[in-house]
Amino acid sequence: MSYDVHITRKDDWSDTEGPKISRNEWVKYLAIDKSMELDRDHSAEVDTKVASGAKEPTHALWKDWPDRVPGEREAWMWLEHGNIMATNADAAFRQKLFLVADSLSARLMGDDGEVYNSIGEPEKGRAKLTGDGRKRSWWKFW
């Protein structure tokens, strides 16, 4: 089972409303970061709708990932619903994602709402909260 992390500006990455990262911002970032490469072909391969419904390809490859095996093990990021997403990111990849988030004035959040710090570890004391600011019980999924 995969686990996603999300670069987001929203209170919770899954919120449908809130500040979004635009495709234009993402592409500008990729033009500056030479360790990243926009890959239009991968977007088309992964999803025939291109990047989960995005109008244009947004998949980018982190070429400097220490565990990279070209064509076999890659570190991919893509823009989806105003967030940059990645799947099954190890600590090194989460560190890179944190730097990307910082550059985009955003934060790195896991599927369960945990917020990651600059060394790729969840911050202590940053539990997911309910809409009224109370700590959400671990067993509640809504």
Image: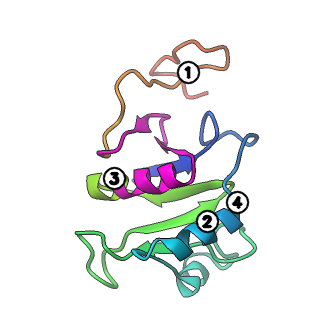
Could you say whether the residue bearing mark 2 is in a helix, strand or loop? helix
Disc 1 versus disc 3: distance between alpha carbons?
Answer: 24 Å
Location of mark 4 (residue): 22
Which tag, 3 or 4, sits closer to the chain's start?
4
- Residue 103 lies in the magenta-colored region: yes
Residue pictured at 53% horizontal, 18% vertical: 136
* Quadrant of the image containing the C terminus: top right
Label at residue 56: none
Query: Is 51 placed left or right of 98 in the picture?
Result: right
Specify the segment rendered in magenta.
96-119
- Residue 29 lies in the magenta-colored region: no
Q: Are marks 4 and 2 in contact (CB under 8 Å)?
A: yes
Location of mark 1 (residue): 129
Location of mark 2 (residue): 26
What amino acid type is highlighted by mark number 1?
Answer: Leu
- Bin the neighbour count of mark 3 within 10 Å (Cα to Cα): few under 14, some 14-19, many 20 and up: some
Disc 1 versus disc 2: distance between alpha carbons?
Answer: 28 Å
Which tag, 1 or 3, sits closer to the chain's start?
3
